[in-house]
Amino acid sequence: MFQELRRQASVLGQRLAFHHVREKNGASEVDIVIEHGARAQIGIEVKAGSTPRTRDLKGLKKLRDAVGERFVVGVLLYDGEHRLPMGDRLWAVPMCSLWE
């Protein structure tokens, strides 16, 4: 997913930085954080399951709370069929959406 997102982002013509974020104690992490300078961050969590769960959003919620208004959206990519709202600026989105 990391490489696919980088590939798709390359056609946008914008400078985007891709990171992985993990707390030192390992309590939470975000698989992919995309930054557009100091202005905006998008968090992406990737799960193989077909049912999005609230606990899968732990790292995204921490990121959202830590960066405040710079947090644009948190996306839980999952192996399902529907886009689902999961809270304030949080969405569950089917992985197949990347290729549609």
Image: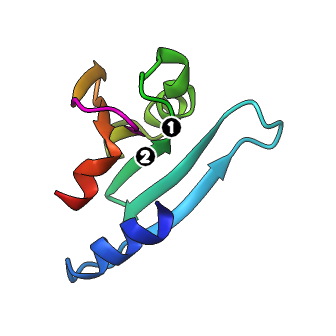
Residue 28, by quadrant, is: top right
Residue 23 in the magenta stretch? The answer is no
| 1 to 9, vertically: above or below | above
Q: Residue 19: x percent and y percent?
A: 55, 62
Q: Residue 90: x percent and y percent?
A: 32, 29
Residue 76, by quadrant, is: top left
The answer to whether residue 20 of the structure is visible from this angle is yes
Q: From mark 2 to mark 1, how far is it between C-alphas?
A: 7 Å
- Disc 2 crowd rating (10 Å Cα; few below 14, some 14-19, many 20+) is many
Residue, x 49% and y 42% (percent of image)? 45
Q: In this view, does 82 lie to the left or right of 63?
A: left
Q: Which mark is residue 43?
A: 2
Nearer to me, 29 or 83: 83
Nearer to me, 12 or 38: 12
Q: Is residue 24 left or right of residue 22?
A: right
Residue, x 80% and y 43% (percent of image)? 24
The region drawn magenta spans 77-82
Q: Residue 83: x percent and y percent?
A: 21, 31
Residue 81 in the magenta stretch? The answer is yes
Residue, x 23% and y 60% (percent of image)? 99
Q: Is residue 82 left or right of residue 92?
A: left
Q: Which three-letter amino acid code belongs to the residue tagged 2? A: Gly
Q: Quick check: marks 2 and 1 in contact, CB under 8 Å?
A: yes
Q: In this view, does 96 lie to the left or right of 76?
A: left
Q: Which mark is residue 63?
A: 1
| 10 to 22, vertically: above or below | below
Q: Residue 82: x percent and y percent?
A: 22, 29
Please identify the quadrant where the C terminus is shown: bottom left
